[in-house]
Image (cartoon, rainbow, N blue to C red):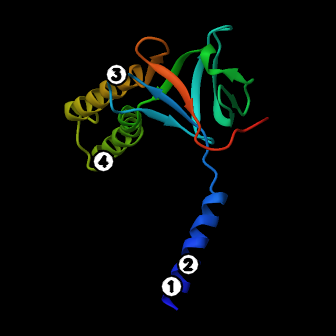
Amino acid sequence: MRQLLISIFLSMALLAINYVNAQPNLVLSKPGVPRHIYYHLGDRISYQDKSTGYKHSGIIYIMTDSTIELDHAPRININNIRVIYRKRPFLMQAAGSGIVVLGVYFPVSVLNRVFNKEYPIVNNDILIVEGSMLAVSGISWLFLTRHYRIGYPWKLQILDFGHPVYN
């Protein structure tokens, strides 16, 4: 009985392997660095085309062994991509927090001083906090997007371990 169960589970595992479909990955790598950036079908990507110089942005819709196609952009060979643009999440949070402080902290502080009848209404402490957060937010917006220039040292390739996709 035990051997029958083991054989059933093994046969189910072997049959399940046939149904697993490995999807291609777009890999942005720098030789000598262990960290790579992977893009899968459905990921958002922004790039600049070598031939036209236009910046295209969208969700990866189709990926073959040498081309990618975004949802609203023409199909492009990966050799024709000049620059990959990627947003930095930490700096996005820093820029967003500056906007929140600008829209929330300042009016609440002023209203609090008005209701408590404290003068001057705009205190130096409010200006220091507001100015520092505005400076951090502005600097974060300057460095928000990282540019990966394809060529030396960055390399762009598609890894596909599954069956070929024909479109």
The circle drawn on residue 3 is 1
Mark closest to the chain's N terminus, 1 or 3: 1
Disc sitting over residue 112 in the figure: 4
Q: In which quarter of the image is residue 129?
A: top left
- In the displayed orientation, state which residue is furthest to the left: 125
For label 3, the crowd category at 10 Å Cα-Cα, with few meaning under 14, some 14 to 19 and many 20 or more, is some
Residue 162 place in picture, x, y as percent: 62, 44
Q: In this image, 163 relative to 36: left or right?
A: right
| Foreground disc of the pair 3, 4 | 3
Mark 3 in CB contact with mark 4 (< 8 angstroms): no
Disc on the earlier residue, 1 or 4: 1
> Label 4 near label 2: C-beta < 8 Å?
no
Tell me whether circle 1 and circle 2 mark residues in contact (CB < 8 Å).
yes
Among numbered discs 2 and 4, the one appearing first in the sequence:
2
Alpha-carbon span between mark 2 and mark 4: 73 Å
Q: Quadrant of the rendered structure where residue 37 is?
A: top left
Q: Identify the residue at image location x=28%, y=27%.
A: 131
Residue flagged by tag 3: what amino acid is it?
Answer: Ile
Question: Which residue in the structure is indicated by mark 2?
Answer: 7
Q: Which amino acid does label 1 sit on?
A: Gln
Q: Name the residue under label 3.
A: 139
Of the image marks 3 and 2, the number of the one nearer the N terminus: 2
Q: Identify the secondary structure beneath mark 4.
A: helix
